[in-house]
Image (cartoon, helix red, strand yellow):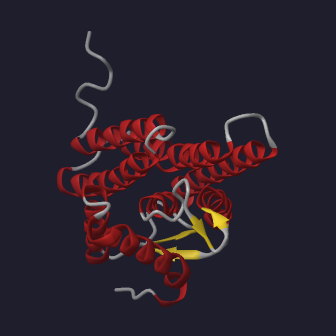
Amino acid sequence: MKPRFVGRVSAADIVTVTNAAIGFVAAAVATVEPTLAARLILLGAIADGLDGVVARRYGSSDAGAFLDALADVSTFVVAPAVLVFSLAGVESGFGLTVATATTLTAGGLFVAAGVLRLGMYAAYDEDDTTTEGVQTTLAATLLAALQVAGVTATGSVIYGVAGPALAVGAAVILAVAMLAPITYPDLLAGDALILGAVQACTVLFPSALRRAFPIALLICALAYVTLSPRFYWRE
């Protein structure tokens, strides 16, 4: 007898489950190589866009939407939360302290908000050109870009605030933003391609040109979060 998935999964599904595996690897290496973990999260974001391209070209399966949501939980919800916890844990130690409890709370809020956001999207927004709340992919991209750009790295201090503390604060803000009643438009194909190229350059050349690529990615992501609900052009 053959496993049930044989003959039922599409090429897009294979890309999707690869994305889920990337999320696990990102979470696993976060405690020892947080910047590598952040780059893997961005690689997962590229795979997330690629599975949509493959689905449109070759078709999708009945399980595609379910697999996509599960993969997103792995790569864009759990892995970023583990990254934030790892950064703060390395900074303050992994003992049972107020700082650790705060970090756990922030990570838990991010995971809860991300799962709820994905569920609402699957139920109500999947076929629309807009969605309510910041996308989980974008929230994960922001946290990853902050790390690769060196903003939240261990040892960094921005305006007197330690980088890992900024990561914890960003996770809480993004948890709220994912559930906020703000309508975000889908990226047009050309803009998505440009963003994917910047993500790829960030993954491949994180330190090139004084970290120009992660900084550019961070600027693009922040611009979308703050400006697109009102100013993003539409077809």
Location of residue 79 with respect to 113 vertically, above or below: above
Q: Name the residue at the top extreme.
A: 1
Q: Is residue 214 left or right of residue 60?
A: right
Vertical placement of residue 211 versus 30, above or below: below
Viewer can see residue 133: no
Quarter residue 93 falls in: top right
| On screen, residue 86 above or below 210 | above
Q: Position of residue 103 (x, y in %)?
A: 70, 48
Instruction: Identify the residue shown where x is 55% and y is 81%.
Output: 226
Which of the 4 image quadrants contains residue 196?
bottom left
Say which of 235 and 36 sits in front: 36
The answer to whether residue 57 is seen in the rendering is: yes
Question: Which quarter of the rendered picture does the C terminus lie within?
Answer: bottom left
Residue extending furthest right?
A: 98
Left or right: where 14 falls relative to 22: left
Residue lying at 54% horizontally and 60% vertically, measured from the top left: 152
Q: At which x and y percent is residue 42?
A: 37, 55
